[in-house]
């Protein structure tokens, strides 16, 4: 019998964190793990191994020149990988590739029938572009997962849903012209928050026109606004009949996050996870991988992700 859920809780995953009181710090994983272990019996899920990603996987999405550049910055261990948000540190290449490797391992476990769903808390690095780091994100595990599903498992129709407070620009723009990637992205309006993208009129280009849905929300958007907009988003995904579902469940849309301006409780996280799990059961044999994404209030991270896991098991 396959596991209903595989979950990665290994300390090694937390090495993808930045020093000197950076918002994306090492405590995020541990806060979630402590809350989870006090809320759900460990026999309700299996453990996913944290593994370093092969360069061949990174290069499915990222340019080789960029991969080599990150290696060099990792050896130097200083400076920034972007304008000023994403510091280099000794071993950043290995830490970032480990996030990708763990997500790819989750994809393989699902496609092998060993699990129906997977949750990787330190993942969902949705700002990184094919040739650049951005917004705390070095390698884009979401983008690699999409390319890996196609290249290694022959999956064509992939749905990517993003409920992080920040627009997932590194996924949206790299697949903007790809009709086989259906995207729904809830986020704080780019007029108020980094990266300033993801406008409602952006629905894909060329053959992919109409295959993307950006849902910018006003500052202080609450649960009621999310719940009112969710049915149209769910219908948009369901009509696509995806073969695999990816969810980026960034916890930074909750009230009290120090980086964003939204006012959700845990309810949207539970609702999205539950409804997408049901869609996955109907359309793709339960195949669903969830990535933790952002979130910089430790209590919010712990509570939102624990709610997600409760829906996945």
Image (tube, helix red, strand yellow):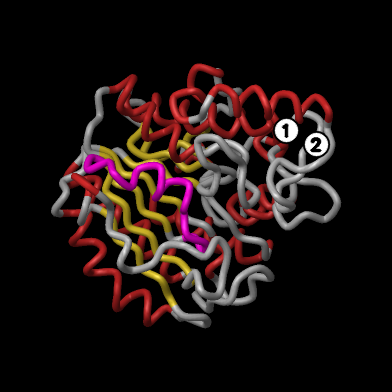
Give the camera-side residue of 32 and 141.
141
Neighbor class of circle 1 (other Cα within 10 Å; few <14, some 14-19, many 20+) is: many
Residue drawn at 22 percent across, 45 percent down: 281
User: Which residue is under mark 2?
Assistant: 89
User: Where in the figure is residue 176, as x and y percent of width and height?
Assistant: 33, 47
Q: Is residue 188 magenta?
A: no
Residue drawn at 29 percent across, 46 percent down: 159
Give the camera-side residue of 243 and 277.
243
Helix, strand or loop at disc 1?
Answer: helix
User: Where in the figure is residue 210, as x and y percent of width and height?
Assistant: 20, 56
Q: Is residue 167 magenta?
A: yes
The Cα atoms of the two marked residues, 1 and 2, are separated by 5 Å
Q: Is residue 224 above or below residue 5?
A: below
Residue 92, numbered circle: 1
User: Where in the figure is residue 125, as x and y percent of width and height?
Assistant: 55, 45
Residue drawn at 63 percent across, 56 percent down: 35
- Magenta stretch in the rendered image: 164-180
Neighbor class of circle 2 (other Cα within 10 Å; few <14, some 14-19, many 20+) is: many
């Amino acid at each position: 019998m396959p596991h209903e859920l595989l979950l990665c809780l290994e300390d090694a995953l937390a090495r993808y964190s930045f020093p000197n009181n950076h918002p994306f710090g090492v405590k995020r994983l541990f806060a979630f793990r402590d809350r989870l272990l006090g809320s759900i019996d460990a026999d309700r899920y299996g453990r996913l191994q944290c593994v370093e990603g092969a360069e061949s996987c990174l290069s499915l999405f990222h340019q080789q020149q960029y991969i080599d550049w990150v290696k060099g910055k990792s050896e130097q261990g200083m400076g920034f990988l972007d304008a000023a948000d994403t510091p280099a540190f000794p071993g950043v290449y290995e830490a970032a590739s480990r996030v990708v490797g763990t997500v790819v391992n989750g994809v393989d476990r699902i496609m092998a029938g060993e699990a129906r769903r997977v949750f990787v808390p330190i993942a969902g690095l949705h700002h990184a572009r094919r040739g650049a780091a951005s917004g705390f994100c070095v390698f884009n595990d979401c983008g690699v997962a999409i390319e890996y599903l196609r290249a290694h498992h022959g999956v064509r129709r992939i749905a990517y849903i993003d409920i992080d407070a920040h627009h997932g620009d590194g996924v949206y723009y790299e697949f903007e012209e790809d009709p086989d990637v259906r995207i729904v992205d809830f986020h704080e309006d780019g007029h108020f928050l980094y990266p300033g993208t993801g406008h409602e009129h952006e629905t894909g280009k060329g053959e992919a026109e109409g295959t993307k849905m950006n849902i910018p929300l006003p500052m202080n958007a609450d649960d009621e606004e999310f719940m009112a907009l969710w049915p149209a988003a769910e219908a948009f995904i369901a009509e696509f009949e995806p073969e695999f579902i990816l969810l980026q469940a960034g916890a930074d849309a909750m009230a009290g996050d120090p980086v964003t301006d939204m006012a959700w409780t845990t309810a949207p996280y539970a609702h999205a996870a539950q409804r997408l799990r049901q869609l996955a059961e109907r359309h793709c044999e339960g195949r669903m991988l969830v990535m933790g994404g952002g979130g910089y209030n430790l209590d919010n991270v712990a509570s939102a992700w624990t709610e997600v896991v409760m829906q996945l098991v």
